[in-house]
Amino acid sequence: MKASTIATALALVLAGPALAEDAQAPAAAAIPAAAQPGTPTASDLLFDYPSMKNTAPGSTLTYDYLRRSGIEKGPFGAPLKDTITLKVAPGKQPDGRDIQVEMFNGMNRRPAGPYEDMTGNPIVSLFLENHLQALSKVLEANPRYLKLAIRRGLRERATVTPMKVTVGGKEVDGWRIVTQPFVGDPLGERMRGMDDLTYTFVTSPAVPGEIVSMEAASKSKDGGELLEEKLGYEQKAG
């Protein structure tokens, strides 16, 4: 896949054609308070900034992945703990990188990539695409509807706040992005109690590829774990 920014990859992941009946994006239930001057948007941090420019060609980025669910009869399947690795090579432009992907290992392996001349980090789209495949299957939902809801949540309903991130034993500046795209959704009753799905992203320019962690999580009213899906940059392997 050739793209100058991760936005192109996002378009393939979150704006593809419907796989079931046509659907419209859910209406936003709430708009977060205005960001402080100088605060980047979620789209800036996750899709638009050239986040691979601080990743040296020849390096490998490793991300630890975990998915587990306490939903009865296990529609998400058995807990999955694995890794995703990105092998980075020079691209055609100074900030671009050619990237080979190893998405999980052994029997869990899934096809992904390669990416050519990427300036953004494809791990974002890889995580969201994998998440959406499982979520749409479990909910028996139109994948396009879910894609549009998440995209709208990141564009219009996300909060972005500064935070400190520990890298190599030192605290560095980072950003936390949080959105709940299905709260107030008109079809929320079809979410099997997961209309509170919360997506949390942490980024920092001090980390190669800038993505520190990503998580999609939902709990039942009694505190039970409906879904915990997360990915984190493995600092020792970066």
Image: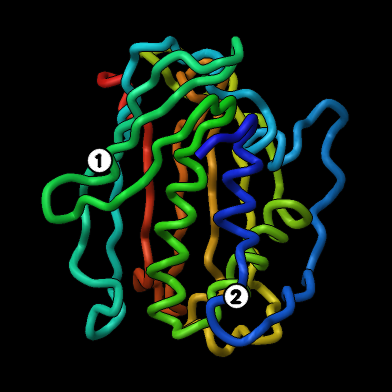
Judged from the image, the secondary structure of the residue bearing numbered disc 2 is loop
Indicate left or right for 93 with 102 as reference: right
Indicate left or right for 105 with 115 as reference: left
Q: Residues within 10 Å of mark 2 (few under 14, many from 20)?
A: few
Q: x and y percent of residue 97 in the render?
A: 49, 21
Q: Residue at x 87, y 45 (%)?
A: 34
Question: Residue 2 appears in which quarter of the rendering?
Answer: top right
Residue behind mark 1:
83
Q: Residue at x 47, y 65 (%)?
A: 132
Residue behind mark 2:
18
Indicate left or right for 92 with 135 as reference: right
Instruction: Report the front residue among 215 and 126.
Output: 126
Q: Mark 1 is on which residue type? A: Thr
Q: Residue at x 84, y 34 (%)?
A: 36
Instruction: Report the front residue among 122 and 216.
Output: 122
Is 186 placed above or below 68 here? below
Q: Residues within 10 Å of mark 1 (few under 14, many from 20)?
A: many
The tag on residue 16 is none
Q: x and y percent of residue 51 in the render?
A: 58, 24
Q: Earlier in the sequence, mark 2 or mark 1?
A: 2
Judged from the image, the secondary structure of the residue bearing numbered disc 1 is strand
Q: Residue at x 17, y 45 (%)?
A: 105
Q: Mark 2 is on which residue type? A: Ala
Is 4 placed above or below 191 here? above
Q: x and y percent of residue 99 in the render?
A: 41, 28
Instruction: Report the front residue among 14 and 67.
Output: 14
| Image quadrant in which the C terminus is located | top left
